[in-house]
Image (tube, grey):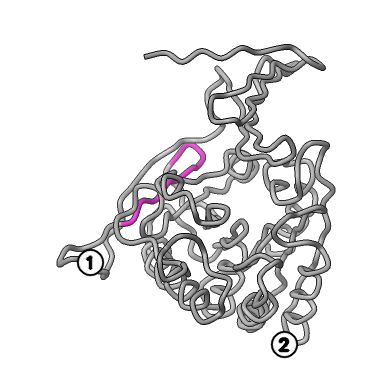
Amino acid sequence: MVDEAPGRFENDELQVRLKTGAKLVLRLRKDGDMELGIWRPETQLLSMGVLSRRPPAYVRRVEWLDTPFMEDGKPVKLEMVIHRPEGDGPFPTLVMNHGSTGMGNRPEWFKLTWVSPEVSAFFVARGWQVIYPQRRGRGRSEGLYDEGFEADRSRYSCKAALSLPGAEHALADLQVAMAHIRQRSDVDARRIVIGGVSRGGILAATYAGLHPQEVVGAINFVGGWIGAGCPDAVKVNGELFKRAAAFPQPTLWLYGEDDPYYPIAHSRANFKAFQSAGGKGTFDVLLPPKGMDGHGTYTVQRLWGTAVDSYLGSLQ
């Protein structure tokens, strides 16, 4: 069955109103690729990407990771997506961690495997590989997605008593993934950087603080565990970032203006708490392009490329 919807051209864009009420926007770029964005309402960007006939700038592999976790009497496996240069390595490696799914009220989104082609293209061009572990219940990973929901699982909880155990659940998944990654023959275990977006960003920083011997750096894109609108946000995010402060090396924090989840003022306060606990790092503010809120700035390489290049150079 094929669905049809009317569209119109406006400002060199094809705009289509979908049956769900969302707006699909397509723009042809000068290089022949097609930019795609889905908005709902008019000012909220739900998804974005690029349609291209060109081959990707990296080799893509999907693997399954055995874990010690058991659910309903069965072992749980995690999905890992790997983007890397040609060859066998070993490569310096970025372990990149996914965030949440908005408010946590769309279970169908839990099953979407998350990667960032923009981050991968940047790192692979510099000889790095990028590994994306999908935590329990996310993407095609097995097990229950249990990272801090309300008791009825209707959405993510704003309460520290429910949210912080969810962070521990995620850290346990990451510890299993990291133990495997550090033993891989294609990974240069002396040059592993951990990174992430949103919940993945704070998760990466916290993991570095808990296991400083395992990584040489940490990159936090727009990180936080619960949004600043939650009454317990200062407590939850502050507690996790204070644990991150035990990492002895500098970290890189990248935040966008007009972030609906982690505004600059809230995130600067998190950074100050991190520094007060002994953490080292740089806090950069990124200005998103028109039509994008600050939470999506990790998809725009030109906003953070110079800062990341400088940071990677400092780790040599």
In the figure, 296 relative to 244: above or below?
above
Q: What is the number of the mark on residue 96?
A: none
Residue 217 included in the magenta stretch of the image:
no
Three-letter residue code for mark 1: Glu
Q: Position of residue 210 (x, y in %)?
A: 53, 80
Determine the residue positioned at 56% across, 14% down: 5
Residue that carries the numbered disc 1 in the rendered image: 71
**How far separated are the C-alphas under marks 1 and 2?**
37 Å
Answer few, some or many: residues within 10 Å of disc 1's Cα (few below 14, many 20 plus, some between 14 and 19): few
In the figure, 7 relative to 46: above or below?
above
Q: Position of residue 254 (x, y in %)?
A: 75, 58
Determine the residue positioned at 42% across, 13% down: 2
- Please, which residue is most extreme toward the bottom here? 277
Three-letter residue code for mark 2: Ala
The local secondary structure at tag 2 comes to: loop
Residue 80 included in the magenta stretch of the image:
yes
What residue range appears in magenta? 78-87
Of 106 and 99, which appears nearest the observer?
106
In the figure, 188 relative to 202: above or below?
above
Q: Is residue 241 left or right of residue 269?
A: left
Q: Is residue 210 left or right of residue 173?
A: right
Determine the residue positioned at 34% across, 47% down: 140
Residue that carries the numbered disc 2 in the rendered image: 277
Image quadrant where one finds the N terminus: top left
Please identify the quarter of the rendering in which residue 266 is found: bottom right
Please identify the quarter of the rendering in which residue 313 is found: bottom right
